[in-house]
Amino acid sequence: MTTMDTLEKPFELGFTYTRSTGPVIGHFLGALAEHRILGVRGSDGRVLVPPPEFDPVTAAPLDEWVELATEGVVLSWCWVAQPRASHPLQEAFAWIMVQLDGADVPMIHCLRAPAMSAVRSGARVRACWVAEPVGRITDLCCFELVEGDKA
Amino acid sequence: MRDIAIVAYSQSPCVADAGAANEVELIMPQLQAVYAQVGIDNAQAVDFVCSGSCDYLQGAAFAFVAGVDALGAVPPIKESHVEMDAAWALYESVLKIRMGHADSALIYGFGKSSPGELPTVLSQRLDPYYLAPLWLDTVSLAALQARLLLEQGRVSERQMAEVVQRSRRNARANPLAQLAGDPSLDDLLAEEPFVAPLRRSDCAPVSDGAAAMIIATVEQARTWGVPYARLTGIDHRMENHNPCLRDLTRSTSTRQAAEALGVSDAPVDVAEIYAPFSHQEILLCEALGLGQETQVNPSGGVLAGNLMMASGLARVGEVFRRVVAGEARRGVAHATSGPCLQHNLVAIVEGA
Amino acid sequence: MSEDVAVMQAPVYLQYHFTAGRAPTRFLRRLKEGVLSGQRCPRCSQVYIPPRGSCPACGVATEEEVILSDKGTVQSFTIVHIPIPGNPIDPPYVVANIVPDGANISFIHLLSECDNREVRIGQRVEAVWRPREEWTWAMENILYFRPLDEPDVAVERIGTLPVTGLEG
């Protein structure tokens, strides 16, 4: 607890927030619990996922839902050799920007992969799901590489 | 519009761990230093005080309020705070003076990041529904951006190493820097990946410390009889909070702010750029429209020491020091805030 | 069709390593020895407890340590009648601003061993310490304050008594 000069002590700061989701995020999370990924169409025609509540260009409310594939392609990635305690995966993994089939923008999530050498931009990946969904983004627990697509 | 003069600036050394010093003890030496430069006693002698800090860094709720204990706020003073880098406290102060509500202002920023795990703490700036629950840390987010730039051929790993090398070399002349040296490009490129494609040297270190500045009307600066530089422009623009809804290979908000200010209308002798990751410096130089004639980050920049919530103000302060010393006639300072260069501020500092 | 999710659990837990600061460290070390201490402003001479390292009125650093009495004066108080979750103390109880002799500002602590109806501003009180072997770096070393059999302090004199108290 002490050193010669200073008094110090580890502590945990906790915020036990429950957040209201609203109609857009709540709808997306509800579908996610059923292993479906929904995007919304923006004013410029692009399909956006995860869905913003308001159009990023015009700020208009968005409500035209588009069901997307649960597979997509990696646009960018980085390799976390030593995961932090807070990270969703505790073995070495990749963060990916993945563009789901049917979407026009990528989303960021984690990719479970056997090694850094197995990951590349352009790789196809698919969503993996938790056994018991709770209505959070983490119900989609991670992505994994589609078999036969390892570079 | 009233002209703004920067009259005083001070920054603490960037240290990995300020140890026992609390926020008051971090701030006070810098405040005393800028008071001494102007010849005043305390915050009572300025019309307005504005600070920038983030309590989450050290996990101490209302540390920014406790920081007011450093000011001498009896009788009460006009005081404000931004939960951002103090460069935005400077912006608020500039508005206050331009509106005629104040003739002088004290600005300070402080950050004690060492008590927490900074990249993890900063992950909670992301939207609370989609990204914050994943605990996507700042280093990983920057690494995703770096790979986009690398694979598009916009930057090379060698160019990134050159940024690091120049930072370390320049920092040798900066006694306040945390990391200085003369690494070879080969040594830098031989370093193990940290969060590939980033190496540890591509990432700003975590630093504790504080910075303070005093600005005033030109008339007030003359009354004080101190050397000053003119802050001839300041602008800031913000992009979408979702990194996937903006083009991470460009800093549109920086470019807009620079164009609005006319950064390229006259030669830029020196630029201090807040790029916490090496590839971002390349991106930002491009967005600012800087050419070969501009000396970039002569202080070493934040790759040599990164005072969260004060580094942006420090960029302005570094340009001010060089202009007042006659080393530069016109300089540009840049500050950033939010995940992956979401929000950017540009300021122009010129000789009196 | 799936059911929309109305609320989302979004807990945030962050780990930190707290350091007390130079001035608070000196204060807490004295407290571990059963002594209350403050720091004096070199400009206005006010004595602050707990010290933060500066005089908030003058904006100058404080260095001079001042040993204080564990006797003091009630500057203000409230009687808490509502139970507070997680608080082990049964209401009603008294929470008071207490200025220790030798200091110029108060801190907040409990007042007990008293008739709540008799508690008043200007009342003299003294600290009741835990057994020495339980002392740590915390104000909990003092269980509570209890009334002293001394004359009340006039309101205008509260916060001005020397460390020797009323005798001074």
Image (spheres, rainbow, N blue to C red):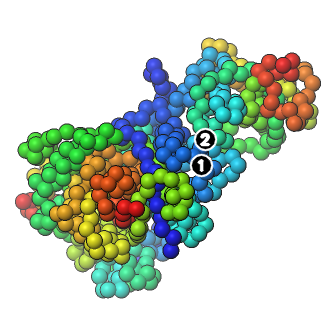
What x and y, as percent, mark residue B40? 57, 46
Q: Is residue B148 above or below residue B209?
A: below
Q: Is residue B300 above or below residue B275?
A: above
Q: Which mark is residue A119?
A: none
For label 2, the SS is: loop
Q: Residues within 10 Å of mark 1 (few under 14, many from 20)?
A: many
Which residue is at a point 82% across and 21% down the rendered structure image?
Answer: C165
Can you say whether B95 is above or below B179 in the image?
below
Q: Is residue B296 left or right of residue B260?
A: left
Three-letter residue code for mark 1: Ala
Q: Residue at x 26, y 51 (%)?
A: B298
Disc 2 residue crowd, few under 14, some 14–19, many 20+, Cα 10 Å: many
Residue A52: quadrant of the picture: bottom left
State left or right for residue C85 relative to residue B32: right
Asked if residue B197 can be seen in this view, the reply is no
- The numbered mark 2 sits on a residue in which chain? C
* Quadrant placement of the C terminus of chain B: bottom left
Mark 1–mark 2 Cα distance, whole angstroms, equals: 8 Å
The image position of residue B163, as x and y in percent, is: 18, 53
Q: Please state the horizontal and vertical placement of residue C46, each as a whole percent of the image.
A: 71, 32
C96 over C72 or under it: above or below = below
From the top left corner, tell me how far across and down residue C112 is, in percent: 81, 28
Callout 2, which amino acid? Gly
In the foreground, A33 or C65? C65
Q: Mark 1 and 2 residues: CB-CB less than 8 Å, in contact?
A: yes
Residue identified by numbered label 2: C59
Q: Out of A34 and C117, give the one closest to the viewer.
A: C117
Task: Report which residue position mark 1 lands on.
Answer: B43
Residue C20 seen in the figure: yes
> What chain does mark 1 sit on?
B
